Image: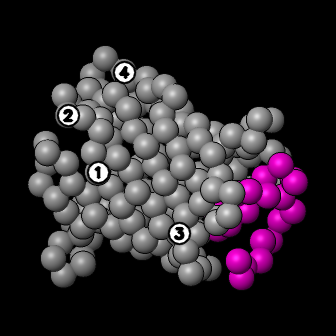
Amino acid sequence: MAFELDVTLPPVLAPLAWLVGRWEGAGVVGYPSMTAANFGQEVICSHDERAFLRWESRSWLLDDAGNQVRQSATELGFWRVLASGEIELLLTHPTGIVEMYVGAKDPVRPAVQLRTDSVMRSPEAKAYNAATRMYGYVEGELMWAMDMAAMGHPLQSHLSARLKRVG
């Protein structure tokens, strides 16, 4: 992993060090209840020397030429490494959804596999039951994918993106 961090991470966060930074890129979104589309994304994964990482992601839909059409999803959250070695990701969304993911670091590569341990929805949020996410650091890029079970559909592909570290 050829990158340097500008802060000192507590040793407990070493399995997630590759996530720290500002990332930009594009991906694909699709689901049976929507038309597939391309999206742009910015992720900021920051650290203040405490035993968690702060996660902020925002995305926007893109037209066929790659121009921004409108804002799309936003999520805020925190990554933690538990005493058991499991990885936890807590996310909140302005659409009335709160997710708690739990998973494991890949033993060989800088990658994490997560599944929802719980999903909470406000009374007016869309029906959403479960998800899995995979994040990996591949050839200097952050790649991720999400499968989702929602609106009566079984767990299936929903989002994926490829992001480059910037700044």
- Is residue 64 located in the magenta-colored stretch of the structure? no
- Judge depth for marks 1 and 3 and give the one in front: 1
- Is residue 4 located in the magenta-colored stretch of the structure? yes
Three-letter amino acid code at disc 1? Ser
Circle 4 residue: 122
- The residue positioned 54% from the left and 37% from the top of the image is 101
Question: How far apart are the alpha carbons under marks 3 and 2?
Answer: 28 Å
> Start and end of the magenta stretch?
1-21
Q: Is residue 151 above or below residue 50?
A: above
- Crowding at label 4, few (<14), some or many (≥20) Cα neighbours within 10 Å? few
Circle 2 residue: 153
The percent position of residue 127, horizontal first and vertical second, equals 26, 26
- Crowding at label 1, few (<14), some or many (≥20) Cα neighbours within 10 Å? some
Question: How far apart are the alpha carbons under marks 4 and 3?
Answer: 31 Å
- The residue positioned 74% from the left and 56% from the top of the image is 15
Which residue occupies the foreground of this view, 57 or 27?
A: 27
Circle 1 residue: 157
- The residue positioned 64% from the left and 66% from the top of the image is 109
- Judge depth for marks 4 and 1 and give the one in front: 1
Three-letter amino acid code at disc 3? Leu
- Crowding at label 3, few (<14), some or many (≥20) Cα neighbours within 10 Å? many
Question: How far apart are the alpha carbons under marks 4 and 1?
Answer: 24 Å
Circle 3 residue: 142
The percent position of residue 68, horizontal first and vertical second, equals 26, 70
Give the position of the N terminus as an image quadrant.
bottom right
